[in-house]
Structure formats: structure tokens, C-alpha cells
Amino acid sequence: MNHKKTALLLILVLNGLLMNAQSIQRSKNQVSILFGLTQPLLLRGFNIEGNYWMKKFVVDYSHGLNLHLYGKFVGGQIEQQQLDLKVTHSLGVGFGYRFTEGFNLRIEPKLHLFEVYYKGEQQNSDNRVGNYSTFTLGLGAYYCWLPFREREGGLRGLTIAPSVRFWPNVSSSLDDNPLIYFNKITGKNEEHQAANIGAANSPWILNVSVGYTFK
């Protein structure tokens, strides 16, 4: 089973779990719209996330756009080969359990679409070194904090949500063969394995999101 079929199967399973959870928990339903800070500050991109809160459960959908993994943020062979990995889309769902009102742990299947360019070059089809996709399946630990929840007025729903995520690659379109290409900067054939989505080419992601929670 390829990673796209695996992702679809997991999304269908999570959707079934969500429908079952909704039939059990019908109180205190809320919706949060959040925007990640790491993506624009460090990755020159954008991320939006929607959370649907139930009494004991939470389900989310997140979508990152035009994220750049390059230089010391990834290090290793990617930095040595002077590559800029552009993640055109990083998207998926999460289903979690609320251990407390603020803290929750989620299972998260995600799909990531990579394009490979030389660092500093214009990013278009003529300059693209290659492209591939990865599928990750991991966990995310989140804390949802509403600092003004006890107040009346517009600030009441202001939400700050720090998170730690572990998203290891489960499969990729490069599983059978790595990307082998002639690198015009190093002057030799180079090999590029499917990258991880986190910092330092790892599965670990730290982020803080801000947004608003609506009852």
C-alpha cells in the first residue's frame, strides 16, 4: 500500500472515530482557528489550523504552505549540497484526547509535498532539481491556553497553543530509489534521501500557534 492510500485509510478511520466521539460528547463544543508562528518566522511560509473541541476529544485539520527547509535549520548533507527544500503543501488531520482542559495528545497522519532547488535560485520548473512526497504518522502534544477566558469582551477567545510533535516518515515516493543528480555547485553526483519535516532533518517539530476560540 503506497503512502497516499495509507493516508486515506487513516483519515477514514479517524473520521469514524470522530463521528463516534460526537455521538457521545455533545457539550462544550468549540472551534479554534490558529496560525503557526514558526512557519513565517523561520520557514518563510504559512500555516493555518482548525480545531474542533468536544468535552473529551479534539479533532484538527492543519495546512502549511510554501515552507522552506534550508541551511542550518536542516544542516547535514542538505546544507552541504546547498539545497533549498520547498514544502509546497504540508497537510493532514489529527485526533486527540483531552487529558485536562488545556493539555491534549493527538495521533496525526500528514502528507508533505517537497520540491528541491539550489539555495538562492529562482524557484520554478526550469530550476527544480526534483520533487517527491512523504507521509508521516506520529504524535503531537498540545496545550491550549486562553489567557483572558474569564473576562468579557473580544479578548476572551484569544488563544495561545504551544506544541511538540513527533512526525517520523512512514513512506515516501523515494522509498525505492533516492534522488541522484549532478550538483552544479559541488561538481559531482549527489544523493538526496527523502527529508524529514522537522528541524535538523529530524521528525521533531516545536511550534507556538496563536488565534481565536469560538464557542
Image (cartoon, rainbow, N blue to C red):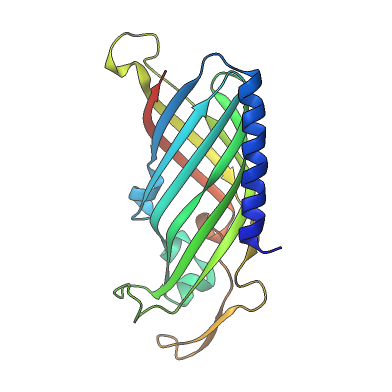
Left or right position of 119 against 204: left
Residue 26: image location, x then y, percent: 58, 16
Of residues 183 and 87, the one nearer the viewer is 87
Q: Is residue 155 above or below residue 34?
A: above
| Total labels drawn | 0
Q: Quadrant of residue 84?
A: bottom left
Q: Quadrant of residue 169?
A: bottom right
Could you tell me if residue 177 is visible in this image?
A: yes
Q: Residue at x 66, y 36 (%)?
A: 16
Residue 85: image location, x then y, percent: 44, 67
Q: Residue at x 61, y 54 (%)?
A: 136
Check the picture and name the quadrant holding the C terminus. top left
Of residues 76 and 47, the one nearer the viewer is 47
Q: Is residue 67 above or below residue 85?
A: above
Q: Is residue 205 above or below residue 156?
A: below
Q: Residue at x 61, y 24 (%)?
A: 22
Could you tell me if residue 168 is visible in this image?
A: no
Check the picture and name the quadrant holding the N terminus. bottom right
Q: Is residue 211 above or below residue 14?
A: above
Residue 7: image location, x then y, percent: 62, 53
Residue 198: image location, x then y, percent: 53, 54
Of residues 164 and 22, the one nearer the viewer is 22
Q: Residue at x 40, y 13 (%)?
A: 149
